[in-house]
Image (cartoon, rainbow, N blue to C red):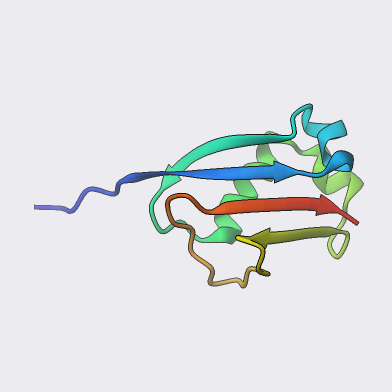
Amino acid sequence: MAELIKPITILVNYNKRLKDITGIDSENVVVSDGIFFTIFLGFIFSSYPEIQIQFPPGNLGMTINRRAPTDFSRLKDGDVVSLHGI
């Protein structure tokens, strides 16, 4: 029997510059447990494509629970992802 992937909730915070794009300060996002941060970031970019236009690589800061993510960071229930344009 296949193991079911459980849903988790991630809080995403946007700074003032990103709020101008998203229209919100923060949002709860439901994703699959253990999702890689890079895939999650792709979801954010597909929801708000203007972020990539206004903040090319190197101009968007991000943290998971106040720590810099890696390419291999996996998200877990209750994580807080913060994005800020620099």
Q: Looking at this rendering, what residue extends furthest in the left direction?
A: 1
Residue 27: x, y in percent?
62, 34
Q: Nearer the viewer, residue 60 or 24?
A: 24
Give the residue at x 59% y 52%: 80
Count of numbered tags: 0
Residue 44: x, y in percent?
66, 43
Q: Looking at this rendering, what residue extends furthest in the top direction?
A: 23
Residue 38: x, y in percent?
60, 60
Q: Where does the C terminus fall, quadrant-wise?
A: bottom right
Quarter of the image where one finds residue 69: bottom right
Residue 13: x, y in percent?
69, 44
Q: Is residue 27 above or below residue 81?
A: above
The reply, left or right, for residue 12 in relation to residue 34 is: right
Give the residue at x 89% y 41%: 17
Give the residue at x 44% y 56%: 76
